[in-house]
Amino acid sequence: MPHSKRNRSDGGGGGGGDGCRSIVLPRRLLLSIFIVSPFLFLLARGGVHSQISKDSEAERDFATNQTTNWRERLAVQNLKSVLTKETGSSADWNSIQFKAENPIGGELAATEEEANGADGNLLTDTPTKVFRRVSRFLLSHHSAMRKPRELRQEKRAMELVQQDEEALVKLENAAIERSKAVDSAVLGKYSIWRRDNENENTDIKVRFMRDQIIMARVFSVIAKSKNKLDLYQELLNRIKESQRAVGEANADSDLHHSSPDKTKAMGQVLSKARQELYDCKVITQRLRGMLQSADEQVRSLKKQSTFLSQLAAKTIPNGIHCLSMRLTIDYYLLPPEQRKFPRSENLENPNLYHYALFSDNVLAASVVVNSTIMNAMEPEKHVFHLVTDKLNFGAMNMWFLLNPPGKATIHVENVDDFKWLNSSYCPVLRQLESAAMKEYYFTSDHRSTLSAGSSNLKYRNPKYLSMLNHLRFYLPQVYPKLDKILFLDDDIVVQKDLTALWSVDLNGNVNGAVETCGESFHRFDKYLNFSNPHIAQNFDPNACGWAYGMNIFDLKAWKKKDITGIYHRWQNMNEDRVLWKLGTLPPGLLTFYKLTHPLVKSWHVLGLGYSPSIDRSEIENAAVIHYNGNMKPWLDLAMTKYRSYWTKYIKYDHPYIRGCKLTE
């Protein structure tokens, strides 16, 4: 809006409140007010001076009075000029009303004259009144500007609080969802999201009492060393009482009802001991000694745990042993003509899908066969070649005679019937008969303690003494008329049709397997002794390892490259176990070096026997899942979250299984 012509008449031009309108003053006006503030102070001082001159007119002359009036008018004219310029209005600027409701919305009490309707005039009012009116206007404007700002700040604060509350709720809901996927068998039954554990300090009393016991032990040792026998005996008594009160408690709710009294009594005796025995250096030494002792105990217990887990992994549960014995007895009661399997003509047909399974576990072998057949699209084209030992030969035959795999073909053989497999031909059999090997297996393992006996126990597993474990290196000799065969371990479960493996192009290689070098411990240098020149000069320490358990072998290429001969050469060089420890994977890595074709990982997922962190989707999308490790699905050691994939292929209502008390 253009500025209107200023009215410079002393009377102010335009009168009263009729033409007055509300004016919102910008920040520039406030700045201008500060600029003219010296004039306001001059007006105030002039007003006071004028009042004094009225009281003593006789003592002042006319010239002085004229000078004062001139100063007042000059200040008012400057203020009028600034206000008119800033507001941009031709309205009578001195008609701005300072009433209860100002233009910006603030509230300010009016003066007595304004409340009575008297129109003020900055040119006619005394300077003191002018100063008061302008001051009230400034205060009103500042208050009006401040209130919207405070409202905005309060509103923003409320929004932030609401956002924080929403974010907290989202985090809690997400944590609850994650907690539902945690396997209680692996991580225990404790969950911070359970209602009885809503207080994060539910074990604070238990921990406090145990801390008291530790300090009491420290002070008891010091008291005994300083011959304070009374205090020593008192500390021992309190330790026993607190230990009985704590017991096996893991939460405050598990504590004995007398625990508060025991805590109080222990606190009193500790206070007494602290006054009489406290020595920072001595206590530090004692605590350090206790820490070292506890660390040694933990290491010893870990060794014992390793020993016991290895021992458990080597054992056969009573139920499976019962099953094998009952089946064996019933098998040898059968007449010879009833011991034969049908469709024997399929055993050497190279156009069918052949599987090799070497096992001494009847229940495990049944799961492998059942899971394969149930997921096969053409079961009649599948042939299973089972090889077991003399002890389980009758049980294995009897089970599959009673429970034939549908239209599939099955055949069971005894490894002891392979007369060609003898110590003169097979280096492993010759080494197992040597005195050094017998010493390694049967003498050096007789230790006085469990922790000492755990050394190298993994390599002293009885399966390494069985030719069933090494028979995988003689597949062309066992099945001379076959072109391809799929080798399966007995601790696997088949979840999809596997016939596509016979169509995989191995690119001239012998072995098709899933590689396991995603982690460093599955490289060659973790299995083989690269300090030996025979290993260092012929193999790459960073070469990728692969897994046994599901392997497709091209038997034609096997024969052409003399794989069995390569295996024999390396096995002969390792008679003193200088190239690798016992087992079949290290010689397999050497034998099939640069002769292994990597398969897609979804064909074979490993780790269900030792790793609790395998993704569920990865398991369910796998064609074969493998329980490699100590936690086999038929053992009590098995992880609960994985066991159902195995147990669903067992008929627990079967008379033999129910009779041997085998349950899910």
Image (tube, rainbow, N blue to C red):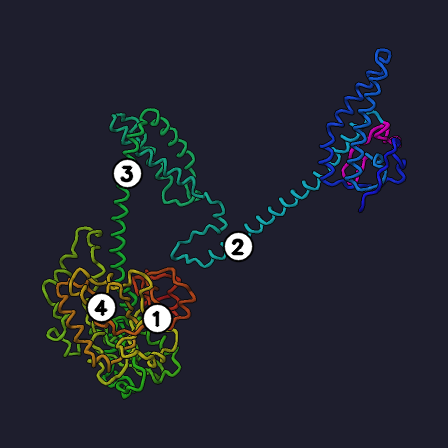
State yes or no: residue 117 in magenta. yes
- Furthest residue toward bottom: 345
Q: Which residue is mark 3?
A: 290
Picture quadrant where residue 390 is located = bottom left
How far is the residue under mark 1 from the one under mark 3? 48 Å
Give percent across and percent down for residue 105: 77, 40
Q: Earlier in the sequence, mark 2 or mark 3?
A: 2
Query: Between 25 and 442, which is closer to the camera in this rendering?
Result: 25
The amino acid beneath tag 2 is Asn
Name the residue at 84% across, 11% down.
59
Pinpoint residue 401: horizontal percent, then vertical percent: 30, 80
Mark 1, residue position: 604
- For disc 4, the marked residue is 584
Q: Which residue is mark 2?
A: 173
Whichever of callouts 2 and 1 sits on the residue coming sooner in the sequence is 2
- Give the residues in magenta: 99-124
